[in-house]
Image (cartoon, grey):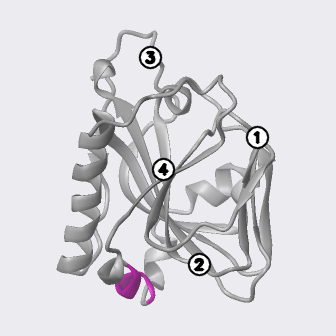
Amino acid sequence: MNMPLEPKNSKWSIKKIKRYNIDAIKNAVSYFDSEWYLDTSRQETYKTHKDTKMFQLRYMDYNWNSFSGVKPEYYDVNKINDDLAQFQVLEIFKDLEQEYECTVVRAELVNMLANTSIRPHLDGGDMLNVSRRCHIPIITNDKVYFTVLNNTVNMEEGYCYEINNGMLHSVKNDSDFDRVHLIIDLLPNKYL
């Protein structure tokens, strides 16, 4: 079954796709400490994300342009230091690539600190415009709210959600606990 790639200029906001087994990922991430500080570029570069920490798994430059004629380059940066957790991540990648007929070109675990928010914003750049962005909550609770356009949801752990990042979106963590999502960008294979 392939996911239809609905244009981002239509009014859809959030799609709940499917559930994945993330038990090993959740367990491994719960022990992260220095891993959150290997790359601080996300929170240092984007003021919107100042209250987050990132563990980069796969990297592609956000500045890639689909009109440039340059083939996109992506590569693995880190892996989770737990074989079962890393296996679960790769199985999620493989399944989403089949579902979307796309390739995972960026992936990161993002920790949003307790009692913080991410202001409404649009993801800019051609790469983020043509790719599909999926969020999989790894550690969350019922006081974390993700809003796209006028649609606010409490995303459930283990479920994959595609967000329309071409629309205004924001996040509010009203809890005393950090929230961790696996964020995956899938580039349609026609660009590869």
SS type, badge 4: strand
Q: Which mark is residue 140?
A: 2
Q: Residue tagged by mark 3? A: 66
Residue at horizontal 57 percent and vertical 55 percent from the top: 41
- Sequence-first tag of 2 and 4: 4
- Sequence-first tag of 2 and 1: 2
At label 4, counting other C-alpha atoms closer than 10 Å, the crowd grade (few under 14, some 14-19, many 20 or more) is: many
Q: Which mark is residue 168?
A: 1
- Does residue 108 lie above or below 15 as drawn? below
- Asked whether disc 1 touches disc 4, contact meaning CB atoms under 8 Å apart, the reply is no
At label 2, counting other C-alpha atoms closer than 10 Å, the crowd grade (few under 14, some 14-19, many 20 or more) is: many
- Sequence-first tag of 3 and 4: 3
- Does residue 69 lie above or below 117 as drawn? above
SS type, badge 3: loop
Q: Nearer the viewer, residue 76 or 120?
A: 120
Comparing labels 3 and 1, the label whose residue is closer to the camera: 1
Determine whether, in the image, residue 144 is placed left or right of residue 80.
right
Residue at horizontal 35 percent and vertical 75 percent from the top: 22
Q: CA distance from mark 2 to mark 4?
A: 16 Å
Q: CA distance from mark 3 to mark 4?
A: 20 Å
Q: Callout 4, which amino acid?
A: Cys
Which residues are the magenta region? 26-30
- Asked whether disc 2 touches disc 1, contact meaning CB atoms under 8 Å apart, the reply is no
Q: Callout 1, which amino acid?
A: Leu
Q: Residue tagged by mark 4? A: 134
Residue 132 % position (x, y)? 47, 37
Q: Callout 3, which amino acid?
A: Ser
Q: Nearer the viewer, residue 6 or 139?
A: 6
Residue 170 % position (x, y)? 75, 54
